[in-house]
Image (cartoon, rainbow, N blue to C red):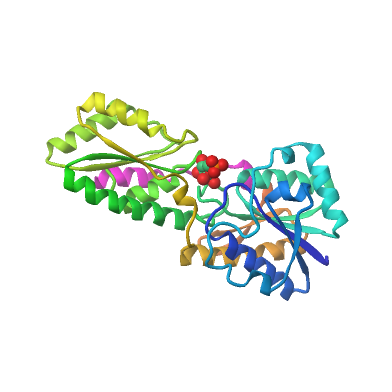
């Protein structure tokens, strides 16, 4: 192996740049050339590449977003698209590929590897923390801290006005961000896509807590692939409790910003480990489990579901 490619795909996540930097510098240290592919698989199909040097990734470790750009590429879901992608790699003499992203990215990458014999390694980069085989994905810690800073501010005004607040955080199919900020922010309750919470139960819990003397509450709601659905939920709770809630949707604020130290360290470890996987023939994602670097079969990484941290949900309710 002489030359590898690297791309970021799917939703951007803070720490992706630290992973790019680590992969580039580790690969060069191992005697490889590195080609950056812009805008994920979309850029691969369009032939948008750039040679990456050690200096080319200087001052990237602290930057949010992704210096390579990213996209969600529908064409790559089709065999024809992947064949074009493989041809683009061959034309540039690229024998291996590091892909940084989430489940959708790994699915496409696994098919590319199987159909066109490309050595592919994955790096889990998404704020949602919804990738199997790694304790944390790159960007999750930063997103939780960003959402937490917002919730701390909301708590100030909620307490001043004796108010009930609903705060919607990101998480398409995973409630990990909601549960993280729910525990760390002292929320009254957390609504996640993995578990059904009947509205009547939520309303009863809020009513009871206010009867106990509570004068402000924060309910954290995961977006669950329906951004803004928190407004409807707040309306229904208003009808059931008589309390007049306020709603705040944090949205894409959670995706940007300077990565935390924890995300930079994780990204640096996994970016370097992914290069070693590519050199060894690919087929796996670099993950971190119980503090150790692990190799997770790409197929498992996108097809298997992480366990829901039910203990955190119980804890939020216990401590409310
Ligand atoms: O990257 C994950 C994520 O932020 C999800 O939490 C969210 O549902 C989705 O991406 C939003 O995607 P987009 O930025 O394309 O609207």
- Is 313 a magenta residue? yes
Q: How many marks?
A: 0
Horizontal side of 79 relative to 156 (left or right) equals right
Q: Is residue 83 magenta?
A: no
Report whether residue 280 is seen.
no
Residue at horizontal 60%, vertical 48%?
102
Q: Provide the major secondary structure of the magenta segment.
A: helix
Q: Position of residue 9 (x, y in %)?
A: 64, 50
26 relative position to 264: left or right = right
Left or right of residue 147, residue 290 in this image: right
Q: Quadrant of residue 111?
A: top right
Q: As displayed, is residue 279 above or below residue 125?
A: below
Q: Which quadrant of the structure image shows residue 231?
A: top left
Looking at the image, which residue is at 58% across and 54% down? 125
Above or below: residue 133 compared with residue 223: below
Instruction: State the image coordinates of residue 272 (x, y, percent, origin top left).
Output: 65, 67
Q: Where does the N terminus fall, quadrant-wise?
A: bottom right
Q: Residue at x 15, y 42 (%)?
A: 214
Residue 197 image offset from top left, x and y in percent: 35, 31
Identity of the residue furthest to the top in this view:
239
Residue 221 visible in the snapshot = yes
Q: Which residues are magenta?
A: 300-320
Q: Is residue 42 left or right of residue 286?
A: right
Q: Image quadrant of residue 53?
A: bottom right
Q: Position of residue 237 (x, y in %)?
A: 28, 28
Quarter holding the C terminus? Answer: top left
């Amino acid at each position: 192996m002489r030359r590898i490619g690297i791309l970021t795909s799917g939703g951007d996540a803070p720490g992706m740049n630290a992973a790019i930097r680590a992969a580039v510098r580790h690969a060069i240290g191992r005697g490889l050339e590195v080609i950056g592919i812009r805008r994920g698989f979309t850029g691969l199909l369009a032939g948008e590449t750039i040679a990456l040097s050690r200096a080319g990734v200087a001052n990237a470790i602290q930057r949010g977003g992704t210096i390579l750009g990213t996209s969600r590429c529908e064409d790559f879901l089709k065999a024809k698209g992947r064949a074009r992608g493989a041809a683009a790699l061959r034309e540039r003499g690229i024998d291996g590929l590091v892909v940084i992203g989430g489940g959708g990215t790994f699915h496409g990458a696994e098919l590319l590897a199987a159909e066109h014999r490309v050595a592919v390694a994955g790096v889990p980069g998404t704020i949602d923390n919804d990738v199997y085989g790694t304790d944390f994905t790159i960007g999750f810690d930063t997103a939780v801290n960003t959402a937490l800073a917002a919730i701390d501010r909301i708590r100030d005004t909620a307490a001043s006005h004796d108010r009930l607040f609903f705060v919607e955080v990101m998480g398409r199919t995973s409630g990990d961000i909601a549960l993280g900020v729910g525990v760390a922010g002292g929320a009254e309750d957390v609504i996640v896509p993995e578990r059904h919470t009947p509205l009547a139960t939520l309303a009863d819990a809020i009513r009871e807590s206010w009867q106990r003397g509570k004068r402000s509450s924060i309910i954290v709601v995961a977006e669950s692939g329906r951004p803004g659905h928190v407004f409807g939920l707040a309306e229904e709770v208003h009808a059931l409790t008589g309390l007049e809630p306020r709603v705040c949707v944090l949205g894409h604020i959670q995706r940007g910003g300077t990565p935390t130290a924890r995300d930079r360290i994780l990204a640096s470890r996994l970016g370097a480990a992914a290069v070693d996987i590519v050199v060894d023939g690919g087929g796996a994602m670099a993950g971190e489990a119980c503090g150790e670097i692990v190799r997770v079969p790409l197929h498992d990484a996108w097809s298997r579901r992480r366990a829901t941290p039910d203990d955190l949900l119980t804890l939020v309710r216990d401590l409310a």
